Structure formats: C-alpha cells, structure tokens
Amino acid sequence: MTLEPPSGAPSWVVLSGSTIGSVHVRDHLPLQDSIHTWTNGVQAVVAVADGHGHRAHFRSDTGSALATVSAVEELRRVLGDLTDPETAADVVATAAAAIVDTWVAKVEHHIEANPYDGSDDRQAAALHDPLRPYGTTILAAAVTGDLLVVLQIGDGDSVIVTDQGEAMRAVPDDPQLDGLHTSSLCEPDPLSALRTAVIDTRVEDVALAFLCTDGFGTSRVDAEGWWRQTGEQLVDFGRTRGLDWMRDQLPGWLEEPAQIGGDDTSMVIIVRGDLGAGAGSGERPVDPHRTLTAELANTLERP
C-alpha cells in the first residue's frame, strides 16, 4: 500500500537509460537489460535487471523485463511500511521474497502462453528446468520519507553518493560472484544471494543513488575506483549543470561502455530534486559530445 507522503519530504527525480551492447548487435541478440521505474515526486521505486544472455537463457530478455516489473510492484506495496530504520530491513527482506514469488508466477504464465516444444537441446533442457531460460539478475531501490532501501541478487552495482560527492557501495559484495558466473533469479534458492541495505538519507546526507548493470563497470579501465569517480562526477553535474542536462546526457554516457565492453549497459539514478537548484551559476563550458568517461578522465587530470 502506498501512503500519502509526509509534507515537507524531499523531492526525488529518476533518470534512467539503457543501451544495447555491440556484441549483442553483432550476434543479432535482443537487448537483455531492463529498467522499470515509478515516482510521484517525493517517493520513488526503481529496478534494473540484466538477463544472462547465454544460449541456455534464451528467454532472458523476457526474464529481465518481468523481474523489473515484479520488483517495482512489490516495493511499491511496502512503501507505507518503510517508516522506521529499525524495522525496514525486515520489510525489505519480505518484499524480496515477494519479488521472487511474483517473478516466478509471471514466468510460469509466460511459459503457459509460450510452451517449450523440445525441438532442440535448449528446449529439451528447459522442459526439466523451466525457469533457466529466463535467468536474470535484479537490482532495486526505493526511497520514501528519510529512508532509502536497496536490494540486489546477482552482479551489477548499487552505489549511494553523499552531498559532498563521497560514494559508497550500498550492499556487501556477493561471495558467489567469480567474474564468470552470477547469482540469478532462476536458481533454486535465489534469496540465498540476497543483499540488502537500509540508509537513513539524513544521516548519510544522500544526494543520489545509482544502480547499473555490469556492462557499465566492467568496461572501465580504472576498475577499482570507477564507481567512486562516477558518483563524485554525477553530484558535480547535478549541482553545476542541472538534472535536465544529466537526463539528456545519460544515453551518451551509456553508449561508450556498451560499444567498448560489448555488453548491454543500463543505469538508473535517483537524485534529490534540489541538487540542481543552483545549476548554471559559474558552471564550466559544456561540450555536449563529451561522455561520462571523458569527464572522469578530465577530472583525474586536473590538479
């Protein structure tokens, strides 16, 4: 149930984008990332998912789309319960279980309408493991009142950034990730890989949070610190150039990693609405063709 937000609550803006990877274009594969978002201005729920793309997961584009819809549906249901940092973790865990159940139900409904026919080895394997073709990760976040909650199953990055531009990973690392395999909603017990966070936005002074599929991070040459630099730069962009400018630039920022790394690349940003209130005052000249990567390089080069 979504309750009426309290008066005086901070406003939140959602920015999102998704770009197909060059390898998927080459191999005539569909975009397998998905994004779904909802906001009423002071509350927001967002989700991003990365369908696995391996030939065994031949319906993962559908799987990722169903995952993001399921995540937004279930997190919206619990917004009214996210009022106390002490109880929010249990609310998020309950929502995560509901997301898995809802995703499974939606996948089963899709299979009923599009049954496997056993015509090749993939179809035959799917008859014995029907969820596997829909394999996908899920990253989701919700903000309401002074609470920001995050949940994640599988790879990708969830990052929160303070008003001072200090970035921190929202959830712990997944010990099951080895660079080749990822946890998935299609596994027998996906909740064993669930990672969650509850953040009091007043205590952490949160300016924004961003969720992205691994196509964004794995293409970075500065693999250890790219998310810190990205967070710092996004806050700077919001403050000096404004949120409308960020929205316009986001597709271009995703295009370069999708081309270089070859994987689908998606990002969703929840940003505090007042961050861009002073944009245009003393800002640097803007080259609209510069990518986020180029801006980061420029930042690193400046003394």
Image (cartoon, rainbow, N blue to C red):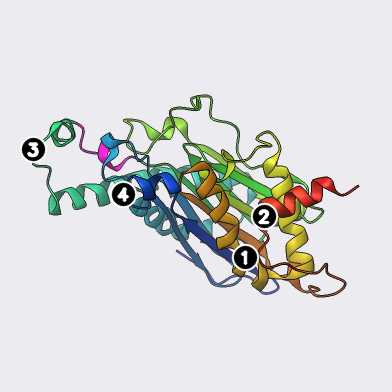
Front disc: 1 or 4: 4
Q: Which of marks 4 and 3 is nearer the N terminus?
A: 4
Task: Give percent across and percent down for residue 54.
Answer: 33, 36
- Mark 1 and mark 2 in contact? Answer it, CB < 8 Å: yes
The answer, for residue 62, to whether it is visible in the render is yes
Query: In the displayed structure, would residue 158 be above or below residue 34?
Result: above
Displayed quadrant of residue 40: bottom right
Determine the CA span between mark 3 and mark 2.
45 Å
Determine the CA span between mark 1 and mark 4.
27 Å
Identified by mark 2, the residue type is: Leu
Residue at the image point whose x is 44% and y is 31% from the top: 182
Foreground residue, 21 or 85? 21
Q: Which of marks 3 and 2 is nearer the N terminus?
A: 3
Task: Give percent across and percent down for residue 2.
Answer: 48, 66
Displayed quadrant of residue 5: bottom right
Task: Give percent across and percent down for residue 292.
Answer: 67, 55
Q: Residue under label 2, please give it.
A: 292
- Mark 4 and mark 2 in contact? Answer it, CB < 8 Å: no
Front disc: 4 or 2: 4
- Residue most extreme to the right: 303
Q: Earlier in the sequence, mark 4 or mark 2?
A: 4
Label 2: state its secondary structure. Answer: helix
